[in-house]
Amino acid sequence: MQALDATRIAAPGRVRLVRGSHIVLPALYQGDHAYILQNDDRRIVFVIPYEGRFTLVGTTDVLHDPADGPPRCTPEEAAYLCRAVSRAFRRGIAPADVVWRYSGVRPLQDDGADNPSAVTRDYVLKLDRDGPPLLSVFGGKITTYRRLAEDAAGQLCAAQGNRAPAWTAGAVLPGGDLGGFGAAAFLQQAAQRYAFLDPALLRRLFRCYGGELDRVLGAARRREDLGQDLGGGITERELEWMRREEWVREPEDALCRHTKRGLHMTPAELDRFAALFRRQPAAMAE
């Protein structure tokens, strides 16, 4: 096979990697309302009810060097968020109170700002028409990803003479189609179809999978049809779904990123789940 010549393309811009870290604490207050705290460094910090028993606090703005490895919430970031909460709440918070922490990286457009918090959150699209259309994407956040994707597709389609109108803004995401029902009505009907399920488990499954609930549970007509409880209420049937449809590959994917059930499990339960996860991959995945 003839080797392809590698072509180096000069990037029309740069991104800056800015880390945002969060901490999870035992619930700080009752109710489902959230707070926005004005911090003394002129940043804001969110305090949000989380998973019924916890409070989520975030976020930070710290430049991230890929050489440092995957993003991690550092002790300094955790202490920063604890101080922000302690200034606003009667109850003082310390890093020892943190039950879980996690981080992500924002690939923001490098606009030359010195302060990571001042780096623009807007995205920039640059289309190179010198040859086949090449679109470079700089910046953007998960809160604007649908607008960014629509804009990017529109520019690429236009460059190829396709003037079809945009349609994705009103399209529902997987699980968002409830058949014309509101959430309460959909859940009420699901409770009749799956009367064998504990109501709390059914609500949790609905929160995770929405309108795809029937596909997750399949033809189950009794609790045993869902297979073994692997821990935290996650059954073999649910894990099959996560492996097949949501690309779960590691125990942390299922427990931390998809269901958050790891927050509700003891260390022994977490170890058992990891062992079962790795012991039976062929039986649990298609």
Image (cartoon, rainbow, N blue to C red):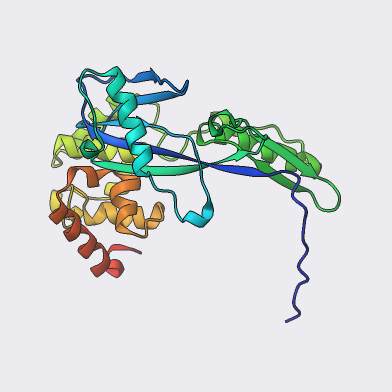
Tally the numbered discs: 0
Image quadrant containing the C terminus: bottom left
Give whichever of 211, 254 is nearer the camera: 254
Residue 169: x percent and y percent?
Answer: 57, 30
Q: Quadrant of residue 159?
A: top right
Residue 190: x percent and y percent?
Answer: 24, 35
Q: Quadrant of residue 193?
A: top left
Identify the residue at image location x=24%, y=33%.
Answer: 94
Identify the residue at image location x=22%, y=25%.
Answer: 92
> Would you say residue 75 is visible in this rendering?
yes
Image quadrant containing the N terminus: bottom right
Question: Left of 32 or right of it: where is 227?
Answer: left
Give whichever of 113, 19 is nearer the camera: 113
Give whichever of 124, 195 is nearer the camera: 124
153 up-or-down from 277: above or below: above
Question: Left of 23 or right of it: where is 135?
Answer: right
Give whichever of 209, 27 is nearer the camera: 27
Residue 38: x percent and y percent?
Answer: 41, 18
Seen from this angle, which residue lies furthest right?
130
234 up-or-down from 286: above or below: above
Residue 75: x percent and y percent?
Answer: 34, 43
96 up-or-down from 36: above or below: below
Question: Left of 60 or right of it: where is 219?
Answer: left
